[in-house]
Image (spheres, helix red, strand yellow):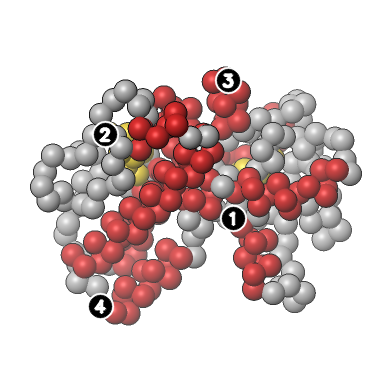
Amino acid sequence: MEGTPNLAARTVEDVFTDFRGRRSGLIKALTTEVEKFYKLCDPEKENLCLYGLPNETWEVNLPVEEVPPELPEPALGINFARDGMQEKDWLSLVAVHGDSWLLSVAFYFGARFGFDKNERKRLFQMINDLPTVFEVVTLNVRQSKDKSAANDNSGKSKTTVKMQSRQADPQPRGVKMSPPPKDENESGEDEEEDEQAATLCGACGLNTGSDEFWICCDVCEIWFHGKCVKITPAKAEHIKQYKCPSCSSKRARV
């Protein structure tokens, strides 16, 4: 199967790079490439699994026949529940199982390569600094709450390019060039975590590139790096209402 690892001795950084690549693949399957993923999970097929691959891609496939498998296996039979649940609930369930699988693979490597207590702790800390797949997939719930007040006070499309002061308006209506700032002096730890989660890219799940171009979906109100959804500032100026790949695919299936 694709993604079978080379089990030569590895460092904590090597295992984390593998984890991050597989995580990116799962996030793509459940967000920007969700239409393709949805179609592949036909309930009429046999037990299927969602695999994240180290090269930031993904595949839906049957479990390996090898016993025991070379790597821990993902949740089996994710396709059977597809039509028996609301889509968002099904995707959230797959995301939770995906997070569990990612951790099991990472710490399988930790055991296989003989990581000691400090190395295992460092690996977990590196992993824990990233939002989970579940948090990325369900990001729209938090972002909808955070943006509700701003949305009620403005009728303009979020794809209208606006160079606003982020300090004056932490949730600007319009294409933003960087995520909202954090006020570490006036908020507690829980508020800081919520604020950070609310500024993660809905495609890659990261809050990197503070000076990069961002765009917000007018339907689910999730923010994306422009490069992650292949939208440039020039293209955004001509879009009256932007729909992210996930919302566009949902509309097509209705």
- Badge 3 marks a residue whose secondary structure is loop
Q: Is residue 245 left or right of residue 177?
A: left
The residue labelled by disc 1 is 207
Decide: few, some or many residues near mark 4? Use Cα within 10 Å; few <14, some 14-19, many ≥20: few
Q: Which residue is drawn at 40% across and 35% down?
A: 81
Query: Is 37 located above or below residue 181 in the figure?
Result: above
The residue sitting at the front extreme is 84
The amino acid type found where label 2 is placed reads Asn
Of labels 2 and 3, earlier in sequence is 2
The residue labelled by disc 2 is 47
| Tag 2 near tag 4, CB within 8 Å | no
Query: Is 104 located above or below residue 143 in the figure?
Result: below
User: Residue 41 location, x and y as percent?
Assistant: 37, 29
The mark total stands at 4
Q: Residue at x 30, y 58 (%)?
A: 104
CA gap, disc 1 and disc 4: 30 Å
- Badge 4 marks a residue whose secondary structure is loop
CA gap, disc 1 and disc 3: 32 Å
Of labels 2 and 4, earlier in sequence is 2
The residue labelled by disc 4 is 116
| Tag 4 near tag 3, CB within 8 Å | no
The amino acid type found where label 4 is placed reads Asp
Decide: few, some or many residues near mark 3? Use Cα within 10 Å; few <14, some 14-19, many ≥20: few
Q: Residue 254 carries which label?
A: 3
